[in-house]
């Protein structure tokens, strides 16, 4: 009796969702074009990191070879993006990695994946809103933070120093915009993305005009002198440079690879395109093109900005928190920092929209499958999942208002790696999964010697079982992750 109950439980949690469920009809409006998807992917991926990350990685990890780091990171990202692109064309439904795991692996892992995605999106939304609030507060001289620190300080462990009302209000306003309509929110995203790209073009052109190629050929003697100045020493005898050995690869190829591990997370965000499967006019064409095109545009932007930045200023003199304004001060173009500030706020705005856009769609997909409350599946006449959008916005606003997210943000990296790995495994399983309509009755066939050298030309139940077993075995093997030490 107990064995039958356990078997029934295992069967229920491992059941897969059909690719075309009977009676399931989409309630979304197919109104998005390929350009909308490209702008959405670029906006959510090309966030404020392009204004900060280049300086941090170039100064401490890779030096001028940060361009190579971005190239390696882009290669890894494009492979992940191709997995999402194939799923987006083969399963043009909303839900992203949650849905992909549901149709290939089963309900239990899909449930875990869905909550992993929701947690990542909520933390991402709250952290970007806090960054937007902090950037704006810096521009106006810290008026907001001073007021709340004096009048509403909390001072409790795990909570923020003060309630960030501005960040919470920003999330609520954008939730209202997203709930109003899909087409309207993507139009706003295109405007902010265009401004961001124009500012980055200004940065790139300025860097190539005022740059100096000698900043890619800094000698070790110069770095020793800079180290002595940093440590307030009068002599460089028996001194080791903290800025590497000079040249284009001052920290060696190891530093370039460590920089690539950090730069990989600069390409996170394109997966929001995969949640629009039921809102795109031609998902089989637009989703793959949107993912690949947005990653290519983001790579070119990161590559060119990092090149311009390291040409404008020696990498060891870069400011980690605001490299571009300091670099413009260095070349004598101080007022350009205001253009950088505008671009940074636009980048944060598109990044915030990009992290909020997929969240209600994953909630909608889980609610439609019965894993969350049914009222979350309500869609407005304009095709927006309004209830899920407002509910997720309120949760993210509360987190931005009260909590210190520094520790939680680090967990997002683990969640992102989990989602990317799962999608890659699921696409492998889907390719070798037999057609459900195929006759699956047990048939005895003679096994030929060395038959594994001549696999079947189309998927069969045997190929499906083989791939699942091999992926389970490979997932148990220890994989060294040296970049986690950096």
Image: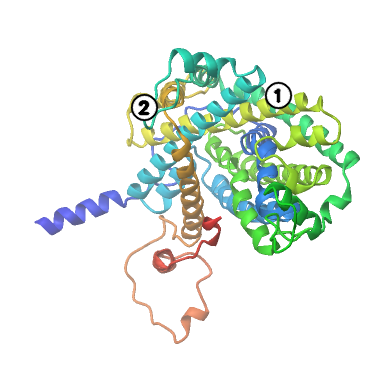
Residue drawn where x is 40% and y is 47% of the image: 102
- Front residue of this view, candidates 4 and 120: 120
User: For the residues marked 2 and 1, what is the alpha-carbon distance in whole angstroms?
Assistant: 40 Å
Crowding at mark 1 (Cα within 10 Å: few <14, some 14-19, many 20+): some
**x%, y% of residue 424?**
51, 56
The residue that disc 1 covers is: 191
- Front residue of this view, candidates 125 and 425: 125
Q: Is residue 393 visible?
A: no
**x%, y% of residue 384?**
51, 23
Closer to us: mark 2 or mark 1?
2
Instruction: Tell me which corner region of the image, top left, top right, bottom left or bottom right, holds residue 49.
Output: top right
User: Can you name the residue that lies furthest to the right here?
Assistant: 209
SS class of the residue under badge 1?
A: helix
User: Can you name the residue that lies furthest to the bottom here?
Assistant: 449
- Front residue of this view, candidates 36 and 245: 245
Q: Is residue 272 above or below residue 429?
A: above
SS class of the residue under badge 2?
A: loop
Residue drawn where x is 69% and y is 47% of the image: 230
- Front residue of this view, candidates 337 and 348: 337
The residue that disc 2 covers is: 156
The quadrant of the rendering that contains the C terminus is bottom right
């Amino acid at each position: 009796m107990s064995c039958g109950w356990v078997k029934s439980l295992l069967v229920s949690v491992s059941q897969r969702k059909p690719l075309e469920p009977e009676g399931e009809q989409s309630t979304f409006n197919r109104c998005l074009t390929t350009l909308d998807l490209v702008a959405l992917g670029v906006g959510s991926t090309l966030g404020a990191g392009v204004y900060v990350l280049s300086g941090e990685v170039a100064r401490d990890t890779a030096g001028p070879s940060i361009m190579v780091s971005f190239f390696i990171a882009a290669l890894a990202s494009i492979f992940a993006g191709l997995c999402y692109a194939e799923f987006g064309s083969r399963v043009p439904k909303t839900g992203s990695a949650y849905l992909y795991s549901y149709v290939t692996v089963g309900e239990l892992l899909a449930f875990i994946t869905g909550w992993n995605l929701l947690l990542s999106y909520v933390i991402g939304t709250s952290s970007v809103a806090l960054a937007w609030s902090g950037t704006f507060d810096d521009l106006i001289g810290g008026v907001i933070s001073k007021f709340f620190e004096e009048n509403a300080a909390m001072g409790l462990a795990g909570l923020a120093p003060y309630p960030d009302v501005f960040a919470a209000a920003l999330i609520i306003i954008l939730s209202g915009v997203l709930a109003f309509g899909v087409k309207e929110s993507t139009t706003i995203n295109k405007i902010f993305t265009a401004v961001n790209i124009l500012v980055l073009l200004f940065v790139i052109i300025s860097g190539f005009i005022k740059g100096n190629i000698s900043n890619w050929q800094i000698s070790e003697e110069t770095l020793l002198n800079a180290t002595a100045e940093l440590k307030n020493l009068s002599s460089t005898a028996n001194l080791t440079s903290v800025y590497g050995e000079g040249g284009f690869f001052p920290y060696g190829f190891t530093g370039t690879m460590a920089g690539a591990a950090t730069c990989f997370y600069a390409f996170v965000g394109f997966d929001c395109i995969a949640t629009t499967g039921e809102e795109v006019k031609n998902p089989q064409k637009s989703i793959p093109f949107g993912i690949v095109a947005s990653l290519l545009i983001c790579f070119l932007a990161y590559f060119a900005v990092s090149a311009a930045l390291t040409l404008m200023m020696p990498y060891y003199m870069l400011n980690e928190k605001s490299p571009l304004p300091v670099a413009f001060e260095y070349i004598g173009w101080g007022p350009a920092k205001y253009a950088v500030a505008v671009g940074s706020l636009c980048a944060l705005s598109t990044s915030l929209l990009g992290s909020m856009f997929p969240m209600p769609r994953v909630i909608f997909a889980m609610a439609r499958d019965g894993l969350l409350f049914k009222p979350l599946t309500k869609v407005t006449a304009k095709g927006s999942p309004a209830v899920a959008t407002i509910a997720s916005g309120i949760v993210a606003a509360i987190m931005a208002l009260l909590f210190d997210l520094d520790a939680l943000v680090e967990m997002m990296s683990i969640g992102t790696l989990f989602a990317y790995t799962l999608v890659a495994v699921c696409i492998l399983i889907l390719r070798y999964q037999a057609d459900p309509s195929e006759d699956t009755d047990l048939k005895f066939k003679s096994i030929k010697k060395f038959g594994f050298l001549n696999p079947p030309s189309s998927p069969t139940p045997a190929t499906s079982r083989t791939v699942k077993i091999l992926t389970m075995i490979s997932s148990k093997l220890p994989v060294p992750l040296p970049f986690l030490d950096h």
